[in-house]
Amino acid sequence: MKQVFTAENRLNVYHIKNLLETKGIESIVKNDGLTSVVGDIPPVTAWPEVWITDPDMEAYAKEIIEHSKTSDVAGEEWTCDNCGEKHSAQFLDCWNCQSSKAF
């Protein structure tokens, strides 16, 4: 297993976990319940973490995570390589044919 993401906000952590899983990367969240021990340990140590089960997928997982940080509503539109449908930047999958956006 390999840690690929951590954040103070557990919503961000679960968002990344969901993004990875929609791309076929199995992941788990660790440290989700450690907020009660902050003060006994450094706060950063208690942040929830996303771990992937297949270390060979680390580069692809980090690419997806990085893309999620730069992607927003005002970003560039993209065109599906499979069916030619145009999409806003925030979408990672084609609504028409369910193909994934190429990175």
Image (cartoon, rainbow, N blue to C red):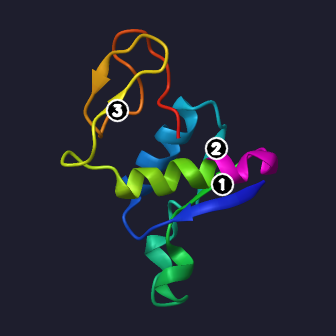
Q: Nearer the viewer, mark 3 or mark 1?
A: 3
Identity of the residue drawn at 46% across and 90% down? 39
Q: Earlier in the sequence, mark 1 or mark 2?
A: 2
Q: Is residue 82 left or right of residue 55?
A: left
Q: Which amino acid type is shown beneath numbered disc 3?
A: Trp
How many numbered marks are there? 3
| Residue placed under numbered mark 2 in the picture | 27
| Residue placed under numbered mark 3 in the picture | 78
Span shown in magenta: 53-60
Task: Provide residue 100's location: percent of width, then percent of height.
Answer: 50, 26
Q: Earlier in the sequence, mark 3 or mark 1?
A: 1
Q: Which amino acid type is shown beneath numbered disc 2?
A: Ser
| Residue 46 vertical placement versus 65 (above, below) | below
The numbered mark at residue 51 is 1
| Residue 70 vertical placement versus 22 (above, below) | below
Identity of the residue drawn at 65% across and 37% down? 25
Magenta-drawn stretch contains 10: no
**SS under mark 1:** strand
Q: Which amino acid type is shown beneath numbered disc 1?
A: Trp
Secondary structure mostly seen in magenta is: helix
**Circles 3 and 1 in contact, beta carbons < 8 Å:** no
